[in-house]
Amino acid sequence: MSSAVQSFMQEVVARNAGEKEFHQAVEEVVESVMPVLDRHPEFRKAKILERIVEPERVIMFRVPWQDDRGEVHVNRGMRVEFNSAIGPYKGGLRFHPSVNLGIIKFLGFEQIFKNALTTLPMGGGKGGSDFDPKGKSDSEVMRFCQSFMSELYRHIGEYVDVPAGDIGVGGREIGFLFGQYKKLTRRFEGVLTGKGLNWGGSLIRPEATGYGQVYFAEEMLKTRGKSFKGLRCVVSGSGNVAQYAAEKVIQLGGKPITFSDSTGFIVDEEGINAEKLAFVMHLKNNKRGRIKEYVDKYPKAHYESVDPKMDHNALWQVKCDVALPSATQNEINEVDANNLVKNGCFCVSEGANMPTNPAGVKVFLESKILYGPAKAANAGGVATSGLEMSQNGLRLQWSREEVDQRLHNIMISIHENCRRTAEEYGTPGNYVNGANIAGFLKVANAMMDQGLV
């Protein structure tokens, strides 16, 4: 770490004590963009970097709700509106017990650059609550969502802030949130994305993050004259992103062999085909079951539990050509990254937000494998949310094929922008630098144009 980065980070850490995920996200960007500041002294003079790491607005509020037994609960809700230089704040809502301000700020900060890369006019934001929808009835989730939106509605709007889903917030939750927003405001507008198809949603939105993750990997593979055909792919997670990443890999001729959840993972050496994927989708989306039930249906596969006390996750020791981390932040550490490289993995494309910690990222970059960081590789989800916003504004719904083609083109454009920018700044093949610098330049130039606001 250079002295300039170190000095900057000391101030960030002091001002944002205890928010380690946020510190991690900021440090990665700052290390990449220091050469940009050398070329653009006007950015230094205008304190663009200092302004960009400070959210424009942070909203925190209590969320009281009542369970089915009549017991009252109080959760904490929040929305971080980080940067609106290129468009209204855009980013998901996460409902999970681990949610705290540091995690929401990390996600919102990443969203600034991810959204800038999509070529669509969207700023960066994120929100959520420490509420856990797991094990709750539909009625309990509805009451929580209605209470949450009873405060959030004051701060959002189709031209102000457009939330979406994230971990713990799927179609059910978006429906309850939108219904309450509509009741309170008397406005039917595209204020949330991930809506139901029959009331303003977009085709391909559920698939978008996983599809985009694979499209980005496909573009990286092309730079080395390869395709997915016949490649072994390790997929982490078994939720929305993982499911559709596996689906697209299958369509492109690849062979997904794993899924995981918080308790462990399955390995199917025969490969997960369309029929097996359909079983996983039913298991996870309808039954809300555990991934270990896969081996009851397909006994040739094997299941391995994961001990969180270990210094590595055995999932990343499974021999593969491509790794698609699609579960959660910091799921790959230095040991895991070394295990992947040692076992022949030559391409990593991130579907989760920041799934590799800094030490793991360093391993990937030093080994010169193809490494697509989340802010580029998983931008397909928010890109399709942007397409949903466009359809809402036009009062139209595009066909599945049209949305998928637009998504594919956006991911090709993101890849090319990252690849070209990395070369321009002297680090060819480094998609981390390429993504950070390309996103930063777009936002920084917009901030300069708009004055000191």
Image (spheres, rainbow, N blue to C red):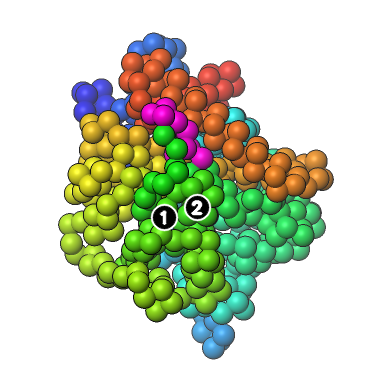
Residue drawn at 54 percent across, 50 percent down = 251
Quadrant into which the N terminus falls? top left
Region in magenta? 215-225
Q: Would residue 342 be seen by someone viewing this image from the given angle? A: yes
Of residues 95 and 355, the one nearer the viewer is 355
Numbered disc 2: secondary structure:
helix
Q: Position of residue 440 (x, y in %)?
A: 46, 26
> How many labels, in total?
2
Q: Which residue is mark 2?
A: 250
Question: Which amino acid type is marked by label 1?
Answer: Pro
Q: Position of residue 178 (x, y in %)?
A: 69, 60
Q: Is residue 305 left or right of residue 420?
A: left
Question: Which amino acid type is marked by label 2?
Answer: Ile
Q: Position of residue 386 (x, y in %)?
A: 64, 41
Measure the C-alpha gap from mark 1 to mark 2. Answer: 7 Å
* In magenta segment, residue 408: no
Numbered disc 1: secondary structure:
strand
Residue drawn at 75 percent across, 47 percent down = 399
Q: Which residue is mark 1?
A: 256
Q: Are the two marked residues, 1 and 2, in contact with CB atoms closer than 8 angstroms? A: yes
